[in-house]
Image: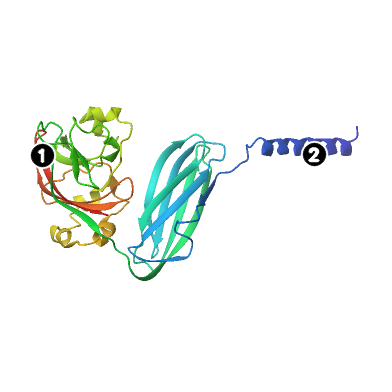
Amino acid sequence: MNCKRLIFYMGLILLATAGCKKEDGSTVMPRILLKNGAYTQNEQFIPVGGKLTFGITATDGNAIITNIKIQRIADGVVITELDQGVYIPDGGLDRDFTAYKSSATKEIWRFLMLNSNRDSAVTTLTVNLGAGSAYGEIYHYPSVKIGMQGNPYLPNYLDLHTGNLYSKTNVSGHEGDIDLVGFVYTTSGILSPTLCCPGYTGSSSVTGHYPEIASWSQARLTAYDYGASDNNLISSDKFDRAQNDSLLVMAFNPQSVSGLCKFCNTGKVIPFKTEDGKFGLIKVLHADLSSVGYMELDIKIQK
């Protein structure tokens, strides 16, 4: 066989091999897309305070989806609204995400996903500032008393949306409604009255103080803005004057949040966001430094 013929056959083999790789899916890349319909659309005009709803779908690229990130670029500032590790082995990703329009003339929203092969996909959408404002109504629960982990008299579990409290004896059937629990623990050598939530699994896991939560089929995650709390960014007076959800939305910084907020002493004001996207503020009216004590909270949350 001469050299030209040998080269010709080798080329055919390489082409056939390359074709097999494409057919068996090894070269498939992930994709991320935004839904149409009732969701916020590209170049839409939304007034300040108006609700933004994004429907996000992603294909996995034949690997486990491991991370989703959502960023808002407003007036040149990049704000990471969500950076969450996930584990989705098959079926792809399907998620809705809610936010509210800032006062920026133009916002670019960037949606990214990553899989276990380190392959990524990204898509973007632009939202323009519309006329007027669209701030919404709020619920106000001026005095909610919640027991710390060892309090035998006051309930321990709180639904922030309704202000309803539950104890260990009557929480059954309402586990999926609970947004907040409180406890006292020692951190950095100091006793800390702490706000937490059933879904928190960090360094001071909520199940260390409420072990029964480990058996709940649903454990909701609330994000507390510890940066605002630690630095006293929201005054008591501003809280008192809030009559709509403007302050509730604008006070929350998604880049300084956790499912646990420490040193929630009397007078602190803590912005939060519930798992279903409702923004709110908590003013601490009273906080004991005892596991058998209680916290009294003044709560404002979006309707």
**Where residue 68 sits in the image (x, y, percent)?**
44, 45
**Where residue 85 sits in the image (x, y, percent)?**
41, 40
Q: In terms of secondary structure, where does tag 1 sit? A: strand
Q: Is residue 35 above or below residue 195?
A: below
Residue 189 is left or right of residue 245, and the answer is left
In this figure, which residue is indicated by the disc labeled 1?
294
Q: Quadrant of residue 293?
A: top left
Quarter of the figure that contains the N terminus = top right
Residue 275 is left or right of residue 112, and the answer is left
Q: How is the image coloured?
A: rainbow
First reached walking from the N terminus: tag 2 or tag 1:
2
Q: Specify few, some or many for label 2: CA neighbours under 10 Å numbering under 14, 14-19, or 20 or more.
A: few
Residue at 28% across, 58% down: 249
Q: Which residue extends farthest right?
A: 1
Q: Amino acid at mark 1?
A: Tyr
Taking depth in this image into account, of 33 and 203 the one nearest to the observer is 33
Residue 64 is left or right of residue 155, and the answer is right
Taking depth in this image into account, of 157 and 11 the one nearest to the observer is 157
**Where residue 7 sits in the image (x, y, percent)?**
83, 38
In this figure, which residue is indicated by the disc labeled 2?
11
Residue at 17% across, 58% down: 239
Quarter of the figure that contains the C terminus = bottom left
Q: Which residue extends farthest bottom?
A: 131
Q: Is residue 61 above or below residue 100?
A: above
